[in-house]
């Protein structure tokens, strides 16, 4: 028999502090991710953040939900992003994933969206019949330095033995890149901050940004203040990202004639970065130049960006390799029906749970 248990803010806090949480053979949420969910400024006290499935009293699977607000046609719709779904191999074949998914949709009255899902999860979502795909984000992955020692072993386990050799190749190739790369003066227009200072906060709140989610400084501050990934060693009991050897969020402040023009928010994980948000004016060329210079100066191997205007200028500045990237999205049919056929989403690289992963 499958039984379900839902957790709101208060209940989730109680769960991670309970003896039961420590006794699970696999954990349904990391403690710091739970704390982040509890502090989400868009989560209500009643919102369901986590659903556990038990089979004969034993934890069998879970689904996580990230509450958010969607603004379309001057209408505010409270939604949930599905951020995790997992069923232990011992309990597969009992349709637990489908039961969890149906419960999540019930809790949010169908106001559910999805992004950053794996092919396995995508198959579950499509099979459910609840969701439809909406236009995806088109972006670019820019590679600035060689990083074969990290990338290739993830593609082929046999190459793990060749890591020392691959590191040597990376070092030699990157040494050559350093020699022939011209240093830009753009860094003179740039200031870097790992925290949201008063200038950044005021700038974000005053920036006119067409967006379906209308992010303000308090929410951006929550994203950087309560990350889902911390520096450290991964907990083997958790199946999703929780720790990394190097992870941080960074604000890039771009100035023109001593006036702040743009604020870029990057997440940097290992040797790769993602552009989450770009707040500011339409001076995309200077913003791209500063971003490009920052990546080279800090030897960040790659950047993923879904900002079309920034990408256009980054392509002119050059990289050793550029690859097209897409980010898929799905929306529950109930939301689409509620909003009508004229819905038009303006979504950015950090929207959904992408800012945390």
Image: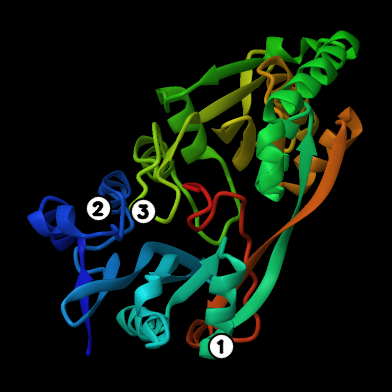
Nearer to me, 275 or 287: 275
Mark 3 and mark 1 lie on one chain; the one further toward the N terminus is 1
Q: Where 183 sits versus 199, above or below?
A: above
Q: Pointer 2: residues within 10 angstroms few (<14), some, or many (20+)?
A: many
Q: What residue sits 80% from the left and 23% below the top?
A: 169
Answer with left or right where residue 170 lies relative to residue 2.
Answer: right
Q: Is residue 103 left or right of residue 329?
A: left
Name the mark on residue 127: 1
Q: Nearer the viewer, mark 3 or mark 1?
A: 3
User: At 71% from the left edge and 40% from the top edge, which residue is drawn?
Assistant: 159
Q: Could you say whether the residue bearing mark 3 is in a helix, strand or loop?
A: loop
Query: Where in the figure is residue 312, as x and y percent of width and height?
Result: 85, 42
Image: 314 above or below 92: above
Q: Are marks 2 and 1 in contact (CB under 8 Å)?
A: no
Q: Establish if 295 lies above or below 85.
A: above
Quarter in which the N terminus is drawn: bottom left
Question: Which mark, residue 238?
Answer: 3
How much space separates mark 2 and mark 3, taking CA atoms?
A: 19 Å
State the residue at coordinates (59%, 25%).
252
Q: Identify the mark nearer the N-term, 2 or 1.
A: 2
- Answer with left or right where residue 31 lies relative to residue 71: left
Badge 1 crowding class, 10 Å Cα cut-off, few under 14, some 14 to 19, many 20 or more, is: few
Q: Nearer the viewer, mark 2 or mark 1?
A: 1
| Residue 82 pos. (x, y %) | 44, 68
Q: Earlier in the sequence, mark 2 or mark 3?
A: 2
Query: In the image, residue 295 lies at what x, y percent?
Result: 70, 24
* Contact check, label 3 and label 1, Cβ < 8 Å: no
Q: Which mark is residue 38?
A: 2
- 344 or 50, nearer to the observer: 50
Classify mark 2: helix, strand or loop: helix
CA gap, disc 2 and disc 1: 31 Å
Which type of secondary structure does the marked residue at label 1 adopt? helix
């Amino acid at each position: 028999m499958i039984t379900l248990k839902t957790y709101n803010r208060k209940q989730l806090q109680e769960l991670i502090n309970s003896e039961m949480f420590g006794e699970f053979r696999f954990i349904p949420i990391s403690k710091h991710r739970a704390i982040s969910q509890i502090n989400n400024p868009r989560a209500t006290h009643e919102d369901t953040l986590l659903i556990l499935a038990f089979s004969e009293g034993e934890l069998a699977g879970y689904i996580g939900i990230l509450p958010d607000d969607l603004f379309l046609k001057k209408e505010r719709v409270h939604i949930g992003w599905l951020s995790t779904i997992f069923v232990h191999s011992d309990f597969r074949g009992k349709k637990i994933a489908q039961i969890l998914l149906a419960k999540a949709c019930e809790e949010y009255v169908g106001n559910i969206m999805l992004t950053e899902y794996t092919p396995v999860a995508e198959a579950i979502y499509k099979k459910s019949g609840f969701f439809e795909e909406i236009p995806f984000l088109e972006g670019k992955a820019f590679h600035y330095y060689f990083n074969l020692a990290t990338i290739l072993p993830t593609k082929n386990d046999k190459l793990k033995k060749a890591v020392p050799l691959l590191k040597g190749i990376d070092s030699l190739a990157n040494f050559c890149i350093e020699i022939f790369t011209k240093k830009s003066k753009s860094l003179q227009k740039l200031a870097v901050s790992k925290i949201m200072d008063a200038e950044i906060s005021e700038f974000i709140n005053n920036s006119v940004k067409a967006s379906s989610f209308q992010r303000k400084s308090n929410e951006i501050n929550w994203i950087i203040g309560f990350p889902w990934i911390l520096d450290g060693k991964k907990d083997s009991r958790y199946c999703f990202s929780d720790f990394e050897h190097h992870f941080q969020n960074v604000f890039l402040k771009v100035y023109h004639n001593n006036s702040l023009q743009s604020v870029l928010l990057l997440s940097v994980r290992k040797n790769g970065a993602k552009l989450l948000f770009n707040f500011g004016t339409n001076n995309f060329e200077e913003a791209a130049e500063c971003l490009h210079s920052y990546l080279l100066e800090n030897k960040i191997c790659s950047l993923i960006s879904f900002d079309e205007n920034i990408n256009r200028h980054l392509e002119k500045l050059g990289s050793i390799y550029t690859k097209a990237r897409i980010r898929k999205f799905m929306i529950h049919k109930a939301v689409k029906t509620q909003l009508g056929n004229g819905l038009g989403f303006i979504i950015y690289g950090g929207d959904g749970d992408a800012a945390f992963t």
